[in-house]
Image (tube, rainbow, N blue to C red):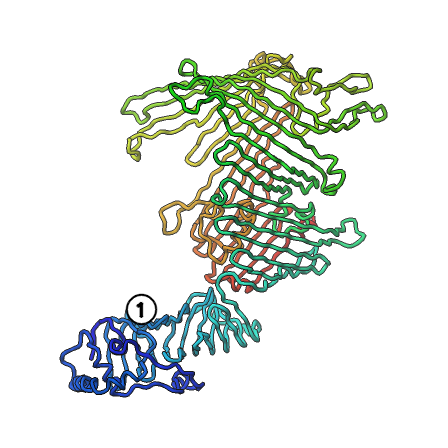
């Protein structure tokens, strides 16, 4: 009988009277033939023909053709008669299966009752427990519990379809499969299965009950094509899904060319998903100054889901060696961080030679970030980068480390008390210059703050706010301890003697008033008090004929000062209207003038005791100094000050017609900001007027901004370049242009292939371009976001190239002019970067620059990349400068075969020492 395009319950839908079909799962004896391998030879439960007929009659099959042959009709009658007489025997008989087996198909199902066999045609889909089989033809033998399946020819594609078998989490595609439901064994021909990033292909395969697979004449590759570009030809192999692949004698095949000398007697490939502990293979190469090397060998520890650690090391044939430790930790919704430590013994040159180097170097990096939702009233963060001065020169592993001569660190903790204006923060800061070995430390730094408080404001305000209710104050108290020493003096007595420390209190008081409804007036006062614990007197040294430090006295010293100010500001608007039919509708000009008056007493008077006098030359001239001038927070200023500060800020907008806007108009900012500020000191004996500061900010084009800063000095200079108390107006000029600086940049790019939206040039640098999973680890390492975009682009090109962007180009230009005296200094530079896809598979990235002062091209990088489907080739070249070097790499893309590569390079260290 045939059921046309019907969903069915397999095995005769005989599960209703029996509930379930159950059979015993006995262990099969090994045999060489398919039948002996697959059949359960110990205690197999075979149904009698009458039992099979009884099962068939027990169910009504939907869609049964009424014109069934007499043979099948007789079988149905016999089943009805036998059912009543054999109920007891049936109840005692073991069921056929452990669970329901169900499925569907698109063409037909044929059930042969006499031979107890089911035939399934056209896209059969069978489910049993956690197993699934899809094929265009299936033959199910109920007696032997064996399923046989194969595909058929697709008339549209002229290719053969292939059965697909899923067991648990493993999926296999094959030419044919013979599967025993009882023993869970299978004989497979022409199988293909994916495990992790790799693909296993085998001509003859045996699947065991524990899902292990034995393969004869197999292939292992990470290429996803049916005919792979490369593979490891295996005489025999065994795979344990989700764990590992073990291979016997094997060799590499490239483009169907066997490379026997790259053969292996045996091999081991881990295929476990997620993070697992294991060995890290080393890299090898040569550096002229250190010799041949074998480095980066180590072990990866996957402790748990929250922490891991990598330990690596290496050595050079000329005596140098290195070791490193890297660890990451994360607690979801709480915090995350990473710790990196690198140590190297650097030996360069020959002993007793003037350029001989034998030194220990290290670098310590630590990052810690707290989730904003975890303890919202307190935060802890750390960004530490501490190293010896020789690390960047001798121990750096990347060009970015080599060029980075300035390192900074910060560890901070802050806490605020909800419902109160109080907050507390403390931090430790570190700054280091590897060129002059100078180290600056700042610890501890403690800041206690009180946010703005209105002491006279009523708790329950009724009516209009009174003027005194606007009076407010804030408080900031700071305790600091700083020192700046050479690297060799760290944690010595010299460092502790040079420490600068103190406590600073700052209390600003302010209010605001409205005058004539248009002028905002803001009076304010500021009180500052400094606490120091030592003072250093100075004296004249007749031997050296100079002023030297004298006695250092410890104690408690309180220095205070205060000042008063009042400021006023308003806004003026000017509008010019055009005709309603004009394209330009109006111009709007906004002016914001500001003027303020400030006064500060003379805290250099003797009554305060902040200043003293000391002989300054052999003629007996005296000069004023402060015993606290080396204090951390400075000294109150000497001399009275009373003056005004004034400024004018302007913006200019244009209103034009626009069909793209729903209102029919669009506003365009012609000038975002144009400001001029200066001040005048009434009590100064000369040079009362301060230089004018000028700032202009506007947009030249869409996404192209221009920012210009300039300084105009109103006074003349003499023949020696010193300012004199004469205005430039006497010469018919507003002032001397002492400085001008500006910078701007832009990025051009084509559209993404297959997309109508522009592709941003810095998508990869900003993290918006999706990175393949095999490269995720590299771009999530601590410190990666601190690398400059150019270097990041080079790192990407070395391992991954985005071929979806046909081309992009960006540039940045900076200009600086300074002339404080007679000599002028001009610095202007141009930088550029970009990438071009010469073909869909060939790509070029480049960056560089030009220094107009030296009239030279600055060092840049050229990278040529070729996409080889499952492989990638790259050539990186720095053609000029002390970074001159090159490297060539061809490697498999998949991370699990990252050691299958060929690379050659020249080190930038060699070029540096050759010069």
- Quarter where residue 15 is shown: bottom left
Q: Residue 251's spot in the image, x, y percent?
A: 53, 73
Pick the quarter of the image with the N terminus: bottom left
**Count the marks: how many?**
1
Q: Is residue 120 above or below residue 879?
A: below
Residue at image location 32% in from the left, 86% down from the top: 46
Q: Is residue 340 left or right of residue 67?
A: right
Which of 836 and 60 lies nearest the eye of the viewer?
60
Q: Residue at x 39, y 25 (%)?
A: 653
Q: Is residue 75 above or below residue 719?
A: below
Asked which quadrant contains residue 658, the reply is top left
Which residue position is annotated with label 1? 157
Q: Is residue 552 left or right of residue 5?
A: right
Please say if 910 is above or below 666: below
> Where does the image place residue 648, in percent across and percent down from the top left?
48, 20
State the residue in front, 412 or 782.
412
The outermost residue toward the left is: 67
Near-viewer residue (282 or 794): 282
Task: Classify 827 as above or below 199.
Answer: above
Q: Give the crowd class for mark 1: few <14, some 14-19, many >=20 residues within 10 Å.
A: few
Expressed as whole percent of the image width and height from the top left, the position of residue 225 reads: 42, 66
Percent x, y of residue 656 = 33, 28
Q: Nearer the viewer, residue 813 or 577?
A: 577
Q: Pick out the residue farthest to the right.
A: 543
Any part of residue 725 in sight = yes
Q: Secondary structure at mark 1?
A: loop
Q: Name which quarter of the figure residue 298 lies in.
A: bottom right
Using the rendered image of the protein, determine whether residue 164 is visible from the camera's viewpoint. no
């Amino acid at each position: 009988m045939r059921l046309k395009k019907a969903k069915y319950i397999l095995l005769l839908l005989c599960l209703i009277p029996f509930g379930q079909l159950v059979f015993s799962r006995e262990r099969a004896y090994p045999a060489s033939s398919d039948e002996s391998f697959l059949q359960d030879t110990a205690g197999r439960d075979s149904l009698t023909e009458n039992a099979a007929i009884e099962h068939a009659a027990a169910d009504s099959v939907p869609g049964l053709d009424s014109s069934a042959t007499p043979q099948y009709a007789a079988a149905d009658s016999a089943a009805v008669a036998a059912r009543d007489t054999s109920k007891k025997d049936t109840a005692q008989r073991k069921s056929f299966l452990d669970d329901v087996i169900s499925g569907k198909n698109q063409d037909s199902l044929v059930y042969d009752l006499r031979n107890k066999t089911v035939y399934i045609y056209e896209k059969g889909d069978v489910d049993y427990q956690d197993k699934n089989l899809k094929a265009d033809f299936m033959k199910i033998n109920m007696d032997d519990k064996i399923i046989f399946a194969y595909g058929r020819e697709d008339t549209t594609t002229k290719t053969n379809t292939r059965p697909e078998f899923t067991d648990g989490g493993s999926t296999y595609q094959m030419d044919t499969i013979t599967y025993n439901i009882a023993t869970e064994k299978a004989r497979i021909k022409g199988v293909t299965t994916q495990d992790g990033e790799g693909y296993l292909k085998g001509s003859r395969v045996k699947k065991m009950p524990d899902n292990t697979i034995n393969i004869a004449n197999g292939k292992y590759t990470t290429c996803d094509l049916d005919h792979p570009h490369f593979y490891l030809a295996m005489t025999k192999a065994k795979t344990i899904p989700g764990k590992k692949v073990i291979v016997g004698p094997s060799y590499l095949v490239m483009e169907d060319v066997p490379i026997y000398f790259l053969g292996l007697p045996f091999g081991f490939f881990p295929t476990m998903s997620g993070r697992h502990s294991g060995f890290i293979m080393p890299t090898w190469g040569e550096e002229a100054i250190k010799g041949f090397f074998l480095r980066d060998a180590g072990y990866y520890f996957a402790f748990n889901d929250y922490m891991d650690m990598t330990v690596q090391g290496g050595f050079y044939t000329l005596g140098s060696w290195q070791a490193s430790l890297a660890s990451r930790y994360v607690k979801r919704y709480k915090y995350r961080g990473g710790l990196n430590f690198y140590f190297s013994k650097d030996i360069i040159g020959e002993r007793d030679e003037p350029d001989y180097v034998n030194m220990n170097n290290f670098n310590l990096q630590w990052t810690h970030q707290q989730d904003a939702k975890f303890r919202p009233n307190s935060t802890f963060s750390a960004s530490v980068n501490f190293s010896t001065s020789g690390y960047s020169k001798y121990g750096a592993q990347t060009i970015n480390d080599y060029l980075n001569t300035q390192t900074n660190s910060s560890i901070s903790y802050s806490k605020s008390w909800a419902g109160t204006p109080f907050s507390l923060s403390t931090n430790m800061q570190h700054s280091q210059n590897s060129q002059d070995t100078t180290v600056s430390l700042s610890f501890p730094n403690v800041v206690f703050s009180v946010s703005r408080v209105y002491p006279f404001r009523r708790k329950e305000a009724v009516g209009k706010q009174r003027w005194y209710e606007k009076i407010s104050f804030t408080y900031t108290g700071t305790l600091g301890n700083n020192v700046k020493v050479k690297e060799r003096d760290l944690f010595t007595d010299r460092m502790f003697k040079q420490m600068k420390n103190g406590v600073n209190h700052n209390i600003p008081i302010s209010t605001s008033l409205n005058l004539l409804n248009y002028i905002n007036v803001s009076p304010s006062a500021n009180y500052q008090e400094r606490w120091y614990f030592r003072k250093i007197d100075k004296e004249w040294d007749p031997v050296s004929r100079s002023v030297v430090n004298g006695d250092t006295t410890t104690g408690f010293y309180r220095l205070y000062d205060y000042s008063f100010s009042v400021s006023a500001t308003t806004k003026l608007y000017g509008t010019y209207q055009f005709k309603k039919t004009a394209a330009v509708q109006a111009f709007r000009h906004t002016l914001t003038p500001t003027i303020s008056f400030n006064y500060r007493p003379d805290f250099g008077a003797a009554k305060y005791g902040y200043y003293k006098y000391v002989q300054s030359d052999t003629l007996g001239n005296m000069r004023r100094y402060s015993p606290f001038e080396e204090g951390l927070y400075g000294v109150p200023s000497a001399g009275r000050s009373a003056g005004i500060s004034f400024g004018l800020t302007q913006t200019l907008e244009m209103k034009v017609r626009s069909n793209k806007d729903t209102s029919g108009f669009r506003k365009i900012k012609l000038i975002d900001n144009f400001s001029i500020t200066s001040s005048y000191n009434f009590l100064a004996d000369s040079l009362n007027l301060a230089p004018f500061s000028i700032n202009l900010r506007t947009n030249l084009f869409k996404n192209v901004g221009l920012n210009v800063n300039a300084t105009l000095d109103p006074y003349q200079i003499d023949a020696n370049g010193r300012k004199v108390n004469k205005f430039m107006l006497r010469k018919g000029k507003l002032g001397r242009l002492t400085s001008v600086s500006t910078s701007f940049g832009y990025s051009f790019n084509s559209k993404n292939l297959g997309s109508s939206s522009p592709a941003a040039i810095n998508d990869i640098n900003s993290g918006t371009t999706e990175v393949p999973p095999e490269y995720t680890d590299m771009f999530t390492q601590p410190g990666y976001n601190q690398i400059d975009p150019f270097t990041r682009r080079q790192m990407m090109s070395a391992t991954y190239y985005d071929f979806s962007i046909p081309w992009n180009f960006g540039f940045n230009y900076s200009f600086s002019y300074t002339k404080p005296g007679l000599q002028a200094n001009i610095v202007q530079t141009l930088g550029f970067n970009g990438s071009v896809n010469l073909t869909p598979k060939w790509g070029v990235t480049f960056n560089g620059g030009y220094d107009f002062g030296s009239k030279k091209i600055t060092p840049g990088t050229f990278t040529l990349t070729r996409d080889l489907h499952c492989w990638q080739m790259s050539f990186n070249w720095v053609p000029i400068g002390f970074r001159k070097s090159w490297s060539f790499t061809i490697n498999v893309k998949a991370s699990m075969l990252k050691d299958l590569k060929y690379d050659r390079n020249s080190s930038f260290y060699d070029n540096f020492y050759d010069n």
